[in-house]
Image (cartoon, rainbow, N blue to C red):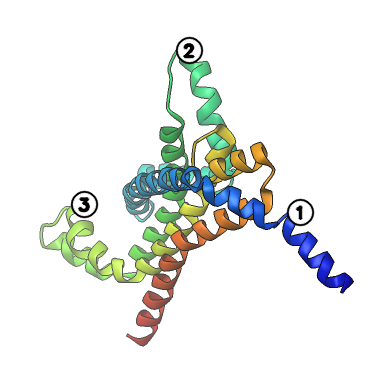
């Protein structure tokens, strides 16, 4: 009987009490708005990361020293410094260098995750290119293709089948990493949830729902990664 009373008390007054859930779901629009910002930053950031990563990856696999050196510096810098510091630098350093210049935090978020994951995608692209026999590139060049043309029409289309699973995995990581813009009041899902929880004290239900929304955004991509990996192994 005592345990039953304690359980009822927990449901009414504990960190996961029913009234806390009711308060959260009556204000769920706040989290939906944050989720939309997260999807926007993730979509634009992923587009930037794919474009940048492809270019840097091709440069990394190049036989020309200067592009290869530039690509290595870029990759090493972004892979060996925390994303949080990179976002802080974009948020705080640019206004110091260019006083009066205002950059929206969503733009900072897009550039932050885009440039960060561009370095990882560059390594994926480089590995995919180098997995294609060097003879195919030499054959394409001997047929009159330029280096860029050979990469575009011969090498990269073949490498795509190899790099798709790790690219999808990078997309999952990118979505999760958008949460760093909560530190600069980015209006994303994490910021919206943290602000609501801090204002009303409903931490338990809020963080459970925020985590579930991130899961719903990432899980389909994680499943797609596994399916692509299984297809590659079966091929």
| Residue 97 position within the rendered picture, expressed as x and y whole percent measured from the top left | 49, 17
Residue occupying image coordinates x 83% and y 67%: 5
Q: Looking at the picture, tell me which residue is in the foreground, 122 or 67.
A: 122
Marks 1, 3: nearer the viewer? 1
Seen in the picture, residue 105 relative to 30 is either above or below; the reply is: above
Residue 148 numbered tag: 3
Residue 89 drawn above or below residue 235: above
Disc 3 packing (10 Å; few <14; some 14–19; many ≥20): few
Residue 69 visible in the picture: no
Residue 40: quarter of image: top left
Label 1 belongs to which residue? 13
Mark 3 or mark 2: which is in front? Answer: 2
Q: Evaluate if marks 1 and 3 touch, with contact meaning CB atoms under 8 Å apart.
A: no
Secondary structure state at the residue bearing disc 3: helix
Residue shown at the point (37%, 75%) measured from the top left: 228
In terms of sequence position, does the residue under pointer 3 or pointer 2 come before the other? 2
The residue singled out by tag 2 in the image is 99
- Secondary structure beneath dot 2 equals loop
Give the image location of residue 212, x and y in percent: 54, 60
């Amino acid at each position: 009987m005592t345990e039953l009373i304690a359980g009822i008390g927990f449901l009414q007054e504990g960190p996961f009490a029913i009234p806390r859930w009711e308060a959260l779901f009556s204000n769920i629009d706040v989290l939906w708005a944050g989720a939309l910002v997260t999807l926007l930053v993730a979509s634009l950031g992923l587009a930037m990361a794919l474009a940048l990563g492809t270019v840097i990856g091709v440069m990394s696999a190049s036989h020309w020293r200067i592009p290869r050196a530039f690509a290595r510096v870029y990759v090493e810098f972004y892979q060996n410094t925390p994303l949080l510091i990179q976002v802080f630098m974009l948020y705080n350093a640019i206004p110091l260098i260019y006083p009066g210049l205002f950059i929206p935090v969503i733009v900072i978020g897009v550039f932050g995750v885009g440039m960060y994951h561009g370095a990882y995608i560059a390594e994926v692209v480089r590995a995919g290119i180098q997995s294609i026999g060097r003879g195919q590139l030499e054959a394409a060049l001997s047929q009159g293709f330029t280096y860029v043309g050979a990469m575009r029409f011969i090498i990269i289309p073949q490498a795509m089948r190899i790099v798709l699973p790790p690219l999808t995995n990078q997309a999952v990581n990118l979505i999760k990493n958008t949460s760093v813009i909560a530190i600069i009041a980015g209006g994303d899902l994490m910021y919206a949830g943290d602000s609501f929880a801090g204002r009303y004290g409903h931490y338990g239900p809020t963080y459970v729902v925020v985590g579930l929304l991130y899961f719903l955004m990432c899980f389909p991509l994680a499943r797609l990664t596994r399916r692509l990996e299984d297809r590659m192994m079966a091929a």
